[in-house]
Image (cartoon, grey):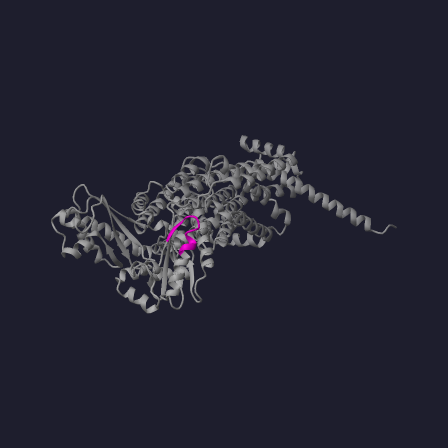
Amino acid sequence: MERLREAFTAVGRTVAEHPGTTLGVAFVLILVSVGGAANITSVTGNEAFVSEDPTLNTYQESFDRKTIAVLVDGDVTDPATLTAVDRFDRRISEVENVRAVATPADEVRAAYARVPGSSARIREVIDPSSTTVVSVVLEADLSQGEQRDVYEAAVDAKDWASFPAGVDVVVTGQPAFTSQLNRLIGQSTSSLLGLAVGLMILALFFLFRGVRLRLLPIVAVFVGVIYTFGAMGFTGVPNSTLTSAVFPILIGLGIDYSVQFHQRYEEELEDKPPRDALPAAVGGIGPPVLIAMLAAALGFGATWLSTIGVPAFVWFAQTSIFGVFLTFLTAIIVLLPALTLYVRYRGDGEEDNDDGDEIRKDDDGEVGTAGRALGAGSRKLAEHPAPVILLAGIVMVGGMYASTTLDTLADPEEFVPDDLPALLDLQQFRDETGGGSANRYDMLVTGGDLRNPETLSWMEEFRDVVTEAGSVTGVESPATLVKANNGGEIPATTAGVEAVLAELPRTQTARFYSDGYTRMTVLGERGLSTGKVISLTENVDEAVETSRPPPGVDAELTGTNVIAPGSTVEQIESRNGITALGVLFVFVLLLLYYRHPVKSVAPLIPMLFVVGWQNVYMYIFEISVSPLGASLGALSVGIGAEYTIIVMERYYEEREKGVAPLDAVETAGQRVGKAISVSGMTTVFGFSALTLSPFPILGDFGYLTVGVIFLTLIAALTTLPPVLIVMDSLKADTLNRLRAKEASAEPSE
């Protein structure tokens, strides 16, 4: 511990001697970070919740051709409307990465070589319909950026086609939804960041009084956020629905780090010149703030390790870890040198800050009304440790039970605003098409001879077995295609199957055969919940086993809409494991730092109470458990440990002076209770920006984090004092027993 203090003192001395150079380094890092931020991409939808998978990769390269759907709400037998459809077809067909376009105009052109000017002639070829779907099939395995380019080209082609007045045309489908969602995520990230900064300015202005440049921590944290964007770009971490939640969290935590350094520097300046005050401040406050930062990082690290197969959560954890390290860094290389230069410019003995607030010196004899109240309350609770700890434990156990009754938010489409135009358009498309891709679950079939009649006969047997299971309405397979074009029969030989397929257009056979692989599609009921999708996948696996594929033939359900639901549900179900891992990480950190079992355990006990209490909070306010919220147990332990550590350190500081346990508790409550309350409130202001997010998953997470920060403060101020008294008592009893044992072991004279 002493070596760590010496290291921080050396850092403080370097900054004090070279403040201008330090700020210059910080500025250069800003320029570098801006360059890195330009490389950030966006990933949304199910793809953000699916990890690398060989079967999925093969399927995507061979068959995963996304479709942009154009809903034409009007009579396509009207020549003007069909002519516009034809113009759209010709325009979009020229766009890169468009594989095929299917429109009613295809059949009419095949019959007449053009679009005739008579509705009657058109009706001889196609039936009239109030709504028509034009399908734009993309090439396989396109990135979201490439899909976005085709979507934007489709929108341009729609406008260029000049549909008649009164004909409503909507460009939708999964690529359209993803493109609009990416745009909304970018807008949401910017607005949440701005809102969090605004709230923090208010918090610092009203709560962080009596210091020079009270808003300077905002500048330091904002620089840390820029560094974080740069780190994302350089390491390839994309922006997603979940990573947009990181920045309000970083502002809340980063402000805390900067405020701690700022406040301690102000205290040291009361009786030291800046050149001596800065090393003393950094050496004194640096280690505990470092431990607080590392505890938060380990909380995020627990999320990372527990969700290593789900990219969205890994990106969230990685971005958070980058952020807490970098905002801690900017507290040292931005805030402290800027404050040093300001103090030197105003003069070492300057007593007024630029806001007109008198810089108040700490008077140990005056702790204020709030401090006295907190001290008296801590003493009162510590005088009755058993009932306090028992009550906290009962509420914790009740929370564990309540956690089993909470609703869940597991469908990725439920993570986005339900009034998002792209989502409404996608739902309309599904209504028109009977569900679209939402109720289609693909299987990749591999093997030696996939056109063998025996293989096709197995596909029919599989269909019969799987359709008996719940939620499955049918199966599309190569056998379906061959029978439909061979009088309802499967040919007896492989040559016969190949002859049937050779007569079909390539666009039809490419749906089922590609690169030596075969695709089958299981059709599910419309509107399946996440739980029913998981049940459907289990039924399909059982049906494959029951129907017994021919030797050498394997079939596996795949696709992002199959894998993503299981990933999100697994994340929710593993939340207790994530919390336990977070507790373990923080305990090891404290043990390495303090090298004392009591000091390593004591700060964690109130946080364990909070893990249970937060479930009661969620139950009362009807907050659903989301995959993001599932990680909050580990995060609350990491974040809340700062408050308990500060209270505990002041308690033991008083005990080392010979103060009695209850008096030490009261002094700790008086001296640091108000400080951590202000610190917690500034953090709450940063986190509260999330409550205004348009994304339900982030809004719920915002309400949850705000509540949990309040609970960690309450736990630190109400349950830690009794815990410290009990542990002190147990320690004293143990020492007394050991001394008695040693005394009894001494030989009598």
Residue 26's place in the image compared with 164, above or below, is: below
Query: 216 or 267, which lies in front?
Result: 216
Residue lying furthest right: 749
Rendered location of residue 502, percent (x, y): 27, 66
Rendered location of residue 86, percent (x, y): 18, 52
- Residue at x 38%, y 68% (from the top left corner): 449
Q: Is residue 42 left or right of residue 374?
A: left
Q: Is residue 168 left or right of residue 615?
A: left
Count the numbered circles shown: 0
Rendered location of residue 220, percent (x, y): 42, 47
- Residue at x 55%, y 36% (from the top left corner): 363
What's drawn in magenta, residue-wise?
A: 463-474
Query: 145 or 414, which lies in front?
Result: 414
Query: 586 or 446, which lies in front?
Result: 446
Q: Is residue 466 magenta?
A: yes
Q: Report if residue 276 is visible in the image.
A: no
Rendered location of residue 650, percent (x, y): 59, 42
Residue 232's place in the image compared with 727, above or below, is: below
Q: Report if residue 606 is visible in the image.
A: yes
Q: Is residue 600 magenta?
A: no
